[in-house]
């Protein structure tokens, strides 16, 4: 049974991750200081190096939490999920603070010299793997695309939908955007090719 001290330490860690995710989403990674995160969390600044080693370590924890949310919301091995049901779940993920933080740090992560480049790349690989697993359950895929091709398109569309929704939430309905993507993927009679393995 965990001690009160262990519980308090875990609570502090979670508060710091939540504060960091919110601030990275609002300001970006570079513009957010350790002091900002500690103040938002209501915890001593010394807690960040204690729990994470550095601001970079805290960022890695934010990315890992986003990966856990993705895994929990889109568990593998759930065949028979319809396209619209799957995309409804994806749209909900994109509305989370963690997903907003990931979008805000995307430019930093693209740089191969960035300390988060590899971790971010691994996150995207996992996201594509989750979508590819789902795509394998489809009875038909448009144009006979491989599950991996579908995954690249869905992840790219998700990033684009999220960016447009955050820029203009009054003009872009993220749920409707995914509904449109579902229509494209589902196609119609004669427009979908049978599933092929790759």
Image (cartoon, rainbow, N blue to C red):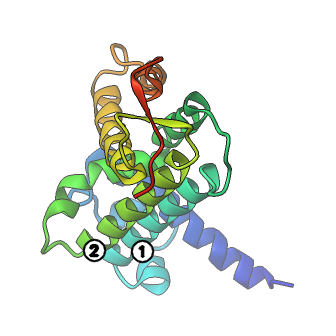
Q: Counting other residues with Cα less than 10 Å from the Cα at mark 2, is it few (<14), some (14-19), or many (20 or more)?
A: some
Under circle 2, the secondary element is helix
Q: Which residue appears at 47% of the width and 17% of the height?
A: 189
Q: Which residue appears at 50% of the width and 82% of the height?
A: 51
Residue 150: give x, y in percent of width and height: 38, 44
Residue toward you, 64 or 57:
64
Residue 175: give x, y in percent of width and height: 48, 23
| Residue that sits furthest to the right in the current view | 1
> Horizontally, is 98 left or right of 117 in the view?
right
Q: Which residue appears at 56% of the width and 72% of the height?
A: 13
Q: Is residue 46 visible?
A: no
Residue 96: give x, y in percent of width and height: 50, 43
Q: Is residue 66 visible?
A: yes
Counting every numbered tag in the picture gives 2
Q: Counting other residues with Cα less than 10 Å from the Cα at mark 1, is it few (<14), some (14-19), or many (20 or more)?
A: some
Q: Quadrant of the C terminus?
A: bottom left
Q: Quadrant of the N terminus?
A: bottom right
Eye-nearest disc, 2 or 1: 2
- Residue 71 found in image quarter: bottom right
Residue that label 1 marks: 45
Under circle 1, the secondary element is loop
Say whether marks 2 and 1 touch (CB < 8 Å): no
Residue toward you, 70 or 104:
70
Q: Which residue appears at 35% of the width and 35% of the height?
A: 162
Residue toward you, 132 or 85:
132
In the displayed structure, would residue 131 be above or below residue 48? above
| Residue that sits furthest to the top in the current view | 171
Residue that label 2 marks: 118
N-terminal of the pair, mark 2 or mark 1, is: 1
Residue 147: give x, y in percent of width and height: 42, 50
Distance between the alpha carbons at the discs numbered 2 and 1? 27 Å
């Amino acid at each position: 049974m965990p001690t009160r001290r262990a519980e308090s330490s875990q609570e502090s860690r979670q508060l710091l991750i939540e504060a960091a995710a919110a601030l990275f989403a609002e300001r970006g990674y570079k513009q957010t200081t350790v002091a900002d995160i500690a103040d938002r969390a209501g915890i001593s600044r010394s807690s960040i190096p204690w729990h994470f080693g550095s601001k970079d370590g805290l960022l890695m924890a934010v990315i890992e939490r986003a990966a856990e949310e993705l895994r929990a919301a889109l568990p593998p091995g759930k065949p028979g999920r319809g396209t619209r049901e799957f995309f409804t779940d994806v749209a909900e993920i994109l509305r989370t603070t963690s997903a907003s933080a990931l979008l805000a740090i995307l430019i930093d992560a693209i740089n191969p010299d960035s300390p988060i480049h590899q971790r971010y790349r691994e996150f995207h690989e996992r996201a594509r793997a989750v979508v590819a697993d789902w795509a394998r359950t489809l009875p038909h895929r448009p144009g006979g695309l491989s599950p991996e091709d579908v995954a690249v398109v869905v992840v790219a569309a998700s990033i684009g939908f999220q960016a447009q929704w955050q820029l203009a939430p009054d003009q872009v309905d993220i749920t409707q955007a995914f509904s449109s993507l579902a229509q494209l993927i589902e196609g119609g009679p004669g427009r979908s090719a049978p599933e092929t393995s790759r």
